[in-house]
Amino acid sequence: MPEHGTREPTGTLVDGPEGRTIQIQRTLSQPPEDVWAYLTDPELLRWFGTYTGDPASGSVQLAMVEAPDRPETCVIEACERPSRLEVTLTEPSGAGWLLRLSLDAGEAGGGTDLVFRQPVAGSGSMAGDVGPGWEYYLDRLAAALEGEDVEAVDFADYHPALREHYTPDAAADTES
C-alpha cells in the first residue's frame, strides 16, 4: 500500500449528455458473474456496506462503510445481470445521486472491464469529495475480489489527496 496521500487517481471528469460526470474504469481479473455477485449479494457486498429490505421491491436502505449510521434509500433503476446496475441513492435531505456500473467481459477473456459513472453537473465542488470516495470503494471491491483484507484500503490514501484531481476547474485544465 502506498503512503498516505500518494495514491494516483484512475478516474476522470468527462462531459456528456448529463453534463459533468465522474467516470472511473477498472480492469478486474474475475469474470463478470463474479464481480456481479460482489455488487449484489448482501454477504459479499460488505466491502461497500450493508442493506436492509428486499431488492425485488425496487428499493433498499443502504449504509456505506464510511457512513454506517446514515443509511440512504437506494432505488434500483436498472438491474441487468451481469452487465448493468444503475441505482439512485437518496440522502435524507432529498438529494439524489445517480450511480451507474457497467460490466463487460475483458478482451483477454476471463476478466471484467468495469466502468463507474456518476453525473455531478450542478453539484458545485461535490466531485472533489465524491471522486476520491469512489476510487476508495472501487479499490475495496478489487481487494475483496482478490481475497485481500478490504480494511487495509485506507480512506486517508484517497481524501483529501485526490480532491484536486476531481475538482471541476482543476480537472478541466488537465483534460485538454
Image (tube, rainbow, N blue to C red):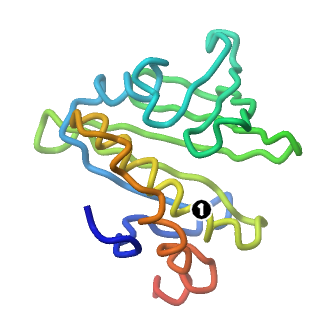
Above or below residue 154? Residue 90 is above
- Whether residue 155 sits left or right of residue 58 in the image: it is left
Q: How many marks?
A: 1
- Percent from the top left, x then y, of residue 22? 55, 61
Q: How packed is label 1: few (under 14 Cα within 10 Å), some, or many (20 or more)?
A: many
Residue closest to the eye, 14 or 87: 87
Three-letter code, disc 1: Thr
Above or below residue 130? Residue 52 is above
- Whether residue 166 sits left or right of residue 88 in the image: it is left
- Percent from the top left, x then y, of residue 69? 71, 36
Q: Residue at x 65, y 10 (%)?
A: 54
Residue closest to the eye, 70 or 169: 70
- Whether residue 170 sits left or right of residue 9 in the image: it is right
Q: Residue at x 36, y 51 (%)?
A: 153
Q: Secondary structure at mark 1?
A: strand
Q: Residue at x 57, y 26 (%)?
A: 50
Above or below residue 76? Residue 2 is below
Q: Residue at x 58, y 46 (%)?
A: 66
Which residue, as the protein is rendered here, is positioned at the far right?
A: 93
Which residue, as the protein is rendered here, is positioned at the far left?
A: 108
- Percent from the top left, x then y, of residue 97? 70, 47
What quarter of the picture does the N terminus occupy?
Answer: bottom left
- Which quadrant would residue 167 be assigned to in this image? bottom right
Residue closest to the eye, 161 or 123: 161
- Percent from the top left, x then y, of residue 98? 67, 44
Residue annotated with mark 1? 21
Above or below residue 5? Residue 94 is above
